């Protein structure tokens, strides 16, 4: 068990990828007009990549096309004081691929805000890391 | 009601700020070694700014000190297909201020991973925006 910071345990890549598969909503970190921005998306893991749907011409579509972006998923149990987060960094691109579209339909991936978000954005992971909150044994 | 994209309604600043006060865990978007990253934090709104705790010397501490960062909060009801997200962009800085420390104690702000995270990071909002998922009336 590797601690990266007090109270935080670094996950193995295997653990991080396994948790990444369990999520439904993630957040994409991009740059819009030289300023940082974060947007929630519904996502799935398809062929080892993070995939979400967006509208042609949307801000998120433009910000992700061809850019290196951050993608984060987390889950928390405030009562138990536990939680984890997984961070993916990779280049995003809009894909036009019938095979991927079928896999998205099979995976039941609906866009975050519904509607006819026909563009498929794919983030190919360059780096994957994960952290888990570990209890320190005290009762605070 | 202003639609920014199909299925998404732009919130007023008043609505966005009101929702920002209701959250507990948010995500900070920063740049670490020229790459984008997103980390979850426990936060409070104190004196009109986003405030969270971090460890001196930590990656998050270094990435936020003096940088313009994104901060995002969201909430979702998958069953009802509703949700909202609020995005804050602003300069982050570590503050050493007894008054702020007392307010953090009053607000019960615990650091995300517990422990002795003594540094207080404050994000002064430059821009605040919010989006809400609106139902399109169809049953999909």
Image (cartoon, coloured by chain):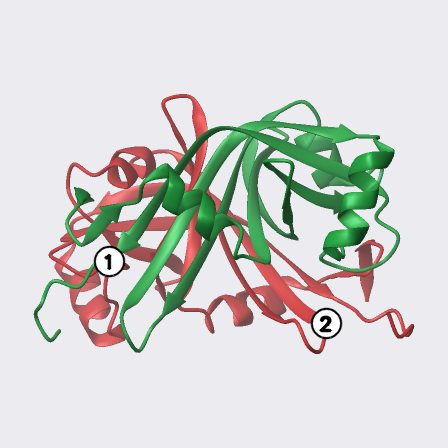
Chain colours: A red, B green
**Foreground residue, A85 or A51?**
A85
Q: Position of residue A67 (x, y in %)?
A: 37, 33
Of residues A54 and B1, which is closer to you in this image?
A: B1
Q: Position of residue A103 (x, y in %)?
A: 22, 69
Identify the subunit bearing mark 1: A
Q: Residue at x 37, y 46 (%)?
A: B15
Q: Residues within 10 Å of mark 1 (few under 14, many from 20)?
A: many
Say the numbered circle drawn on residue B55.
none
- Are the residues under badges 1 and 2 in a single subunit? yes
What chain letter is assigned to the residue under label 2? A
Image quarter in which the C terminus of chain A is found: bottom right
Element under label 2?
loop
Look at the picture and state if B36 lies above or below B137: above
Left or right position of B65 against A23: right
Residue A124 in the image: above or below residue A85 = above
The answer to whether residue B138 is above or below residue A63 is below
Q: Position of residue A60 (x, y in %)?
A: 29, 40
Marker disc for residue A81 = 2
Q: Which residue is identified by label 1?
A: A113
Residue B54 is at least partly visible in this image: no
Q: Secondary structure at mark 1?
A: loop
Q: Is residue A120 left or right of residue B39?
A: left
Is residue A77 placed above or below B85 in the rendered structure?
below
Residue nearest the viewer, comparing A97 with B112: B112
- Write the residue at 78% across / 37% down: B100
């Amino acid at each position: 068990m590797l601690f990266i910071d007090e109270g935080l345990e670094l996950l193995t890549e295997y653990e991080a990828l396994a948790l990444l598969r369990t999520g439904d909503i993630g957040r994409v970190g991009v740059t819009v007009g030289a300023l940082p921005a974060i947007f929630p998306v519904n996502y799935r893991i398809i062929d080892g990549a993070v995939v979400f749907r967006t509208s042609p011409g949307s801000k998120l579509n433009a910000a992700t096309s061809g850019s290196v972006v951050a993608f984060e998923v987390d889950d928390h149990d405030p009562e138990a004081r536990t939680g984890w987060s997984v961070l993916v960094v990779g280049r995003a691109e809009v894909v036009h691929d019938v095979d991927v579209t079928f896999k998205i339909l099979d995976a039941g991936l609906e866009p975050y805000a519904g509607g006819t978000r026909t563009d498929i954005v794919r983030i190919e992971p360059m780096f994957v890391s994960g952290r888990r909150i570990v209890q320190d044994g005290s009762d605070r």
